[in-house]
Image: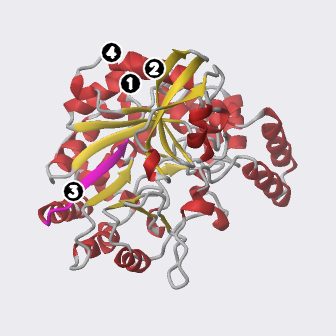
């Protein structure tokens, strides 16, 4: 791709396909009008958006609907429970907006829109600070949700923050400007890490992004040592990082932050090695790395997209080649389309272990499989045989109750368990760990 081509693409807003146009696109590209109809029905409930880059450069339409990037981004009827799909399909057939809305609200409420007690336990409570656009679950880390960054260039079908993207304001976390963040930081000098998340902060203009980041360089906020930015732009719209004033201004912003002594971590959401096989993506990663930022990658292990060891081994090796540090293999959260994407923990453990065997030490930095549950980040270290029977060996990597971090504990083995809430203590000494999550 020539520089002229890059400049042309960067100057264009990513063309996204959404709404009723989805039905026609799927039918035309796959040759199956039934798939188009089903995608249209599911998209009434779960948000759908896809960029022209994903359509034209990432999806192998000859393999669709079984292409992993197609499965990652396009709706499928099995993303909803059969009774939910039938309810929405019937409402859509009636053609009445009120009926559709009522059915959609009913189904969304059943999909656990904010898992892990995000709204009930993570949102800061201050009489004089609006904490609705922040989360403070772990003492050293503050999550910030800029209002202008609460969308993405494309949506992942398994996204646990799908509720951020639907037309229900009460479900959304967002702050309108940096003032609440800076006031909160000034009152909490123990916070060392600020994470801008969404959505995707890189959908924002660089000027807006800077309004949240540059205050972290001001005197009195030296306690903020690490700045993290969560993004999937490398995968879904790498032109944001490649050419044009917005891209160049973003790189200069990251350079200013690193030159000021901040550890800048770009938290890249990379689900499949196909996302790193275009010249645009690889060039975007090189430009990011040139700023001094550390590139780290994470994603959940999910059915239909990356549920085999070879895919993860290839992904980690590609990350290392492109100066990206493998960081987390997550477990799909208990929300949204988990019945379609979720895997048993026992299978996730096997995938992780077998993938590690295929890579060198530099590819083994990813922790996993990890459940980001209400009590904390729980890693499943494996399956062991104890006196009382088989068990999952577990550890907290992070926890609301900090003194639990790093201590091994065990859960009864359950071949069908997919999430923290499915697990039970293996023995009496394990109960304190499960009491932290309410399932002792």
Instruction: Indicate which label's residue lies in the foreground, 2 or 1.
Output: 2
Q: Residues within 10 Å of mark 3 (few under 14, many from 20)?
A: some
Which residue has dot 3 on it? 263
Q: Disc number at residue 351?
A: 2
Which residue is at a point 39% across and 47% down the rendered structure image? 232
Mark 2 to mark 4 CA distance (whole Å): 10 Å
Distance from the alpha carbon under mark 4 to that under mark 1: 11 Å
- Callout 2: 10 Å neighbours few (<14), some, many (20+)? many
For marks 2 and 4 on the same chain, the one whose residue lies earlier in the sequence: 2
How many numbered circles does the render carry? 4
Q: Find the magenta span and give its range.
A: 260-269
Circles 2 and 1, Cβ within 8 Å, touching? The answer is yes
Residue 192 within the segment the image draws in magenta = no
The residue at which mark 4 appears reads as 357
**Contact flag, marks 2 and 4 (Cβ < 8 Å):** no
Question: Disc 1 designates what residue?
Answer: 312
């Amino acid at each position: 791709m020539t520089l002229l081509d890059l400049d042309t693409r960067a100057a264009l807003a990513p063309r996204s396909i959404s709404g009723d146009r989805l039905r026609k696109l799927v039918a035309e590209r796959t040759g199956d009008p039934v798939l188009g109809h089903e995608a249209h029905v599911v998209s009434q409930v779960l948000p759908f958006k896809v960029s022209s880059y994903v359509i034209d450069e990432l999806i192998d339409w000859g393999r669709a609907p079984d292409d992993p990037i197609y499965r990652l981004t396009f709706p499928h009827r099995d993303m909803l429970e059969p009774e939910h799909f039938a309810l929405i399909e019937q409402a859509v057939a009636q053609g009445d907006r009120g009926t559709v809305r009522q059915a959609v609200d009913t189904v969304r409420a059943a999909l656990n829109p904010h898992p892990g007690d995000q709204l009930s336990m993570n949102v800061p409570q201050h009489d004089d600070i609006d904490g609705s656009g922040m989360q403070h679950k772990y003492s050293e880390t503050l999550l910030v949700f800029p209002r202008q960054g609460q969308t993405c260039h494309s949506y992942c079908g398994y996204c646990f923050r799908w509720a951020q993207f639907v037309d229900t304001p009460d479900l959304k976390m967002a702050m309108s400007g940096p003032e609440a963040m800076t006031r909160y930081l000034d009152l909490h000098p123990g916070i060392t890490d600020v994470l801008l998340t969404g959505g995707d902060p890189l959908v924002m203009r660089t000027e807006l992004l800077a309004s949240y980041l540059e205050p972290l360089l001001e005197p009195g906020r030296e306690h903020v040592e690490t700045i993290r930015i969560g993004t999937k732009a490398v995968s879904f719209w790498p032109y944001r990082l490649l050419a044009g004033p917005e891209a160049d201004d973003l790189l200069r912003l990251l350079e200013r932050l690193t030159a000021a002594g901040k550890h800048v971590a770009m938290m890249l959401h990379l689900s499949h090695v196909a996302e790193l096989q275009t010249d645009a993506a690889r060039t975007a990663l090189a430009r990011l790395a040139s700023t001094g930022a550390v590139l780290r990658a994470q994603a959940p292990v999910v059915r239909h997209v990356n549920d085999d060891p070879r895919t993860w081994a290839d992904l980690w090796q590609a990350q290392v080649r492109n100066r990206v540090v493998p960081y987390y293999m997550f477990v799909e959260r208990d929300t949204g389309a988990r019945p379609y994407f979720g895997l048993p923990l026992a299978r996730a453990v096997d995938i992780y272990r077998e993938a590690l065997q295929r890579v060198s030490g530099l590819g083994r930095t990813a922790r996993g499989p990890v459940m980001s549950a209400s009590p904390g980040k729980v890693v499943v270290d494996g399956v062991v045989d104890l006196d009382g029977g088989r068990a999952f060996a577990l550890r907290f990597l992070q926890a609301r109750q900090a003194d639990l971090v790093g201590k091994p504990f065990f859960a009864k083995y359950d071949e069908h368990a997919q999430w923290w809430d499915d697990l039970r203590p293996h023995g009496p000494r394990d109960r304190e760990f499960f009491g932290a999550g309410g399932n002792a």
